[in-house]
């Protein structure tokens, strides 16, 4: 079926008429909603607090030529400063149920919260993720990992939708690999995740979480806006080491700077950095590393322009 061409503003009018109960917000910017604190006006954002709201919106989108973006906690994103012409669906599905050693969570639950639940219920296996400022949905999609752990080790199954139906995939079908999953190349929305942990001692779990958090604070520019590690790990190498060996530590472009604490991070100094400044630094790093080491760095962060 041919989709009807409409502007975003007209789509919002159609949505308002058909589903007056769904509120479309127009007062956000990506600067407000990303950890990088960069990004332009969001012309239309819907807070997805219930699955049926999402299904209604996705169903309507099917008839119209409208682009949409699924936003978690915005901690892996670099977004253009220009106003965006796509609909933003912010996933805020925050239900949590604990059954034995399993935590069943809405995709909008943050990893901090998830760890608190694990501690309270004497469950171990997630401590590596303490301090990652993402949502569970974003973490599954990116197969987030650190300190030897990753989402693939603890994800038992995922419920997701394309707007037509709700599907379920268990761990094997999720095709996890380094910072990749079944969701890497599609626009499905993760709704709910079952996390499977092991019985442990809450005090020990908490201690390990805090140790990992301390390590992060000591080694990463945790107090400055960023989107985490900019590049994926190239084979047998570490991106921050390559960048440092190119003498780029501290390299600045306007308000954007290669962190002096961890060369894998680009930080936003005094909230002055723009999309273009960060993008120029990314381009400079890739060119310099390629020239010096013949290695092509691949971005881990998602760039929206
Ligand atoms: C200080 C700092 C430290 C970090 N440390 C780490 C680390 O140690 N390890 C690591 O792996 N990452 C790290 N990150 C990066 C980031 O936090 C993770 O990738 C996180 O899992 C992203 O989740 P999010 O909710 O913020 O996703 P977003 O940034 O909002 O989105 C990321 C991608 O996921 C998609 N997405 C989000 N929610 C859903 C959903 N429900 N359904 C379908 N798609 C969805 C988005 O469309 C986008 O493609 C760090 C970031 C920062 C700022």
Image (tube, rainbow, N blue to C red):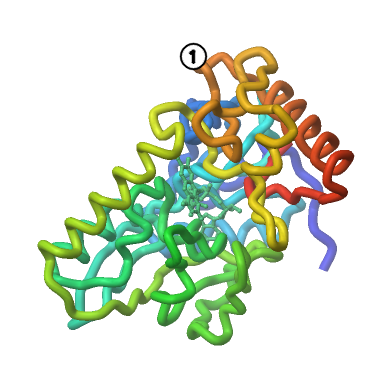
Q: Which of 225 and 48 is in front in this view?
A: 225
Tell me the quarter of the image containing the C terminus: top right
The residue drawn where x is 50% and y is 56% is 138
Point out the image quarter for the N terminus.
bottom right
Q: Is residue 35 left or right of residue 3?
A: left
**Toward the viewer: 196 or 160?**
196
The residue indicated by pointer 1 is 270
Q: In this view, does 223 lie above or below 192?
A: above
Residue 73 visible at all: yes
Identified at 17% across, 63% down, the residue is 119
Residue 26 in view, yes or no? no
Residue 144 in picture, x, y percent from top left: 50, 60
Q: Which residue is painted at 12% across and 66% down in the image?
A: 202
Placement of 236 over or under 28, stated as above or below: below
Helix, strand or loop at label 1? It is: helix
Mark 1, other Cα within 10 Å: few <14 / some 14–19 / many ≥20? few
In this rendering, position of residue 227 left or right of residue 22:
right
Q: Where is residue 109 in the image (x, y as percent from the top left)?
A: 34, 56
Instruction: Find residue 284 and report its horizontal and vertical position in percent.
Output: 79, 30
* Residue 267: % across, % down: 55, 27
């Amino acid at each position: 079926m041919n989709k009807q061409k409409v502007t975003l503003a007209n789509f919002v009018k159609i949505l308002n008429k058909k589903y007056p109960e769904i509120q479309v917000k127009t007062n956000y910017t990506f600067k407000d909603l990303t950890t990088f604190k960069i990004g332009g006006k969001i012309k239309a954002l819907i807070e997805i607090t219930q699955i049926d709201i999402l299904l209604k919106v996705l169903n309507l989108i099917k008839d119209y030529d409208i682009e949409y973006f699924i936003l978690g906690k915005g901690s892996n994103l670099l977004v253009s400063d220009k106003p965006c012409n796509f609909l933003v669906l912010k996933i805020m599905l925050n239900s949590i149920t604990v059954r034995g050693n399993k935590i069943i969570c809405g995709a909008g639950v943050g990893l901090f919260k998830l760890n608190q639940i694990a501690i309270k219920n004497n469950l171990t296996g997630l401590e590596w993720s303490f301090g990652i400022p993402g949502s569970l949905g974003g973490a599954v999609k990116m197969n987030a990992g650190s300190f030897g752990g990753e989402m693939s080790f603890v994800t038992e199954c995922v419920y997701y939708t394309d707007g037509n139906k709700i599907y379920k995939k268990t761990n094997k079908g999720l095709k996890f690999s380094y910072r990749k999953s079944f969701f890497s190349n599609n626009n499905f929305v993760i709704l709910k995740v079952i996390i499977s942990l092991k019985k442990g001692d809450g005090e020990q779990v908490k201690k390990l979480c805090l140790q990992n958090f301390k390590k992060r604070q000591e080694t990463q520019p945790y107090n400055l806006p960023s989107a985490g590690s900019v590049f994926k790990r190239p084979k047998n190498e570490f991106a921050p080491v390559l960048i440092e060996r190119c003498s780029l530590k501290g390299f600045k472009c306007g308000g954007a700077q290669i962190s002096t604490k961890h060369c894998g991070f680009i930080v936003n100094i005094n909230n002055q950095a723009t999309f273009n400044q960060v993008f120029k630094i990314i381009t400079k790093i890739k060119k310099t590393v390629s020239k010096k080491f013949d290695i092509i760095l691949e971005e881990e962060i998602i760039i929206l322009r």
